[in-house]
Image: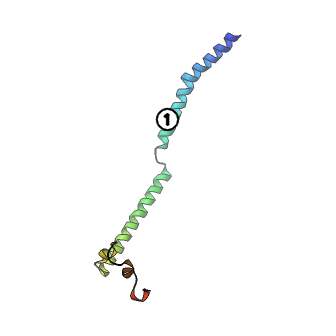
Amino acid sequence: MEDVGGFFVGGLAVVILFLGLPWLIFHYITKWKTAKTLTDDDEKLLDGLHEAARRLDDRLCTIERIMTVENPNWRQQCLPGRGNDTDRLLTNGDRQ
């Protein structure tokens, strides 16, 4: 009776080792490979974000063109470390 139990445990160990373990490994390898790809929703989200970034860049260029027409030296005035920042930012009526 003990030989049958040992034979059963040994057979079960061999089946788990040569069938169960490789199946488990290949199952998760397949899952990892499919998880690396973008879904349709991910692609739509990225396309929307790219379009929003392009529109924001266009708006920024428009604002820079308008500011350059009004004051050609505005970039120099916005650089940090140029004089007193509060004098640059406040008008005469706003000074304390």
Query: 19 or 83: nearer the eye?
Result: 83
Q: Residue 43 placed where, x, y %?
A: 46, 53
Q: Looking at the figure, which quarter contains the C terminus?
A: bottom left
Disc 1 is placed on an element classified as helix
Outermost residue toward the left? 72
Which residue is drawn at the image coordinates 43% and 86% (left, top)?
94
In the displayed structure, 44 sits above or below 17; it is below
Give the number of marks. Answer: 1
Viewer-closest of 12 and 51: 12
**Residue lying at 49% horizontally and 43% vertically, measured from the top left:** 35
Mark 1: amino acid:
Ile
Residue 85 position in % (x across, y down): 37, 77
Closer-to-camera residue (61/47):
61
Residue highlighted by disc 1: 29
Image quadrant containing the N terminus: top right
Quarter residue 86 falls in: bottom left
Pointer 1 local density, CA inside 10 Å: few below 14, some 14–19, many at least 20? few
Left or right of residue 78, residue 41 in this image: right
Instruction: Name which residue lies at 36% across and 80% down.
Output: 88
Up-down relation of residue 1 to residue 19 (above or below):
above
The correct choice, above or below, for 12 with respect to 73 in the image is above
